[in-house]
Image (cartoon, helix red, strand yellow):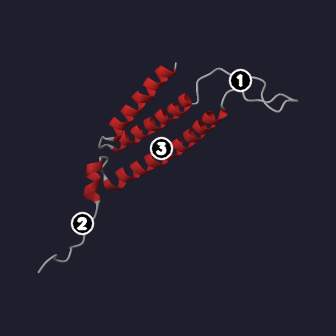
Amino acid sequence: METALAVLVGLFVSVAIYLLLSRALIRMLLGLVILGNGVNLLIFTAGRLASATPPIVPAGLSAPAGPTANPLPQALILTAIVIGFAMFAFLLVLAMQAYRTLGAERSDQLRLAEPEPPPQPPLSY
């Protein structure tokens, strides 16, 4: 099972890099989301896939009785999902606002919206 998930992580990362290298803002945004999902899946796979009992300590014991699931990767992934969704929403609004004000959705067209640099003094006389 880990092999299949490792291949899926590689596929997610490669698709994300392909989308991030495009010039369209929406493709770049989708690439960022897919990259975040690939990293989440990598953390989940690194936490070892095992069907174990929840890490609950029974009454009267100071430690769980048998093998338990590791809650740390699950907590990291839940936090990353929340942060990733907030970042996606912010960047989506930012891209929509850039399209409304500048009328461009490609990164090479956004360069034309920058002001002209001020004239520089002569370098030699």
User: Does label 2 or label 3 sit earlier along the sequence?
Assistant: 3
Q: Is residue 16 left or right of residue 108?
A: right
Spot occupied by residue 8 in the image (x, y as percentages of width and height): 44, 25
Rendered position, 67 above or below 29: above
**What is the three-letter code of the residue carrying label 3?**
Phe
Circle 1 or circle 3, nearest the eye: 1
Q: Describe the element under mark 1 as helix, strand or loop.
A: loop
Q: Quadrant of residue 60?
A: top right
Badge 1 crowding class, 10 Å Cα cut-off, few under 14, some 14 to 19, many 20 or more, is few
Pick whichever, 108 or 17, lies toward us.
Answer: 17
**Looking at the image, how many numbered discs can be counted on the residues?**
3
Q: Describe the element under mark 3 as helix, strand or loop.
A: helix
Question: Which residue is the site of mark 1?
Answer: 67
Spot occupied by residue 99 in the image (x, y as percentages of width and height): 35, 50
At x 48% / y 36%, what residue is drawn?
39
Badge 2 crowding class, 10 Å Cα cut-off, few under 14, some 14 to 19, many 20 or more, is few
**Marks 1 and 3 close (CB-CB < 8 Å):** no
At x 66% / y 33%, what residue is drawn?
71
Circle on res. 88: 3
Question: Which residue is the site of mark 2?
Answer: 116
User: Does label 2 or label 1 sit earlier along the sequence?
Assistant: 1
User: Does label 1 or label 3 sit earlier along the sequence?
Assistant: 1
Q: Is residue 102 left or right of residue 32?
A: left
Q: Describe the element under mark 2 as helix, strand or loop.
A: loop
